[in-house]
Image (cartoon, grey):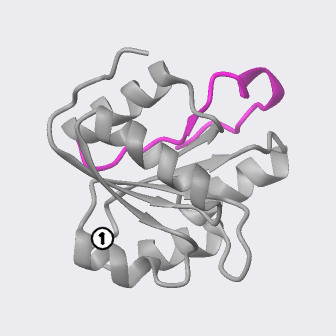
Amino acid sequence: MSPVKTGHLKALVVNDSEDGAESFAVVLGLCGCEAKVLYGADDVVREAVAFLPHVIFIDVRMPRVDGCEAARRIRRESVIADVWLIAASGSSSVVTVRESEAAGFDAYYLTPIDPSVLGAILARASLERRSRSFVLDPQLAPLLRSPSRT
């Protein structure tokens, strides 16, 4: 994999798997990001307000505070409400995808995230604060038809 350089972006990785979070942070670092890791979403708002990331990658299924609740909390905090929120999950469940979109995520990707997809996410995050449409991992498109957005 050739690292995608997107300029200086700050990325927060929220995952209860320490190995997964740390390895993903290393990949983000290779892409030119300043990455910070949280091993759970309990303090995600406080940490995000202090760090002010451009993008937050959140594991959807975590104990205590799950990714969807973390996304709702972030969207309620005005200082960070416009940050890119990326749901990362091993689940291709239609219910999980729809819950993620309803919670305020901007995109949903299966883990591990394909390097070319990661490059596209980072490039987009470096150009704009937030998308107005929900972005779905291309691997999931055949499984899920989302209603048209107005």
Residue 134 shown left or right of residue 37 in the figure = right
> In the image as oriented, which residue stretches furthest toward the top?
2
- Residue under numbered circle 1: 80
Residue 4 appears in which quarter of the rendering? top left
Question: How many numbered tags mark residues here?
Answer: 1
Q: 43 or 93, which lies in front? A: 43
Across and down, in percent, residue 114 comes to 56, 24
Instruction: Identify the amino acid type marked 1.
Output: Ile
Percent x, y for residue 139?
A: 70, 23
Q: Position of residue 129 (x, y in %)?
A: 26, 49
Residue drawn 30% across the image and 70% down it = 80
At 40% from the left and 43% from the top, the residue drawn is: 26
Quadrant hosting residue 30: top left
In-front residue for pair 94/6: 6
Magenta stretch: give its range.
128-150
Check the image and report above or below for 82 versus 115.
Answer: below
Chief SS of the magenta region: loop
Please identify the quarter of the rendering in which residue 103 is found: bottom right
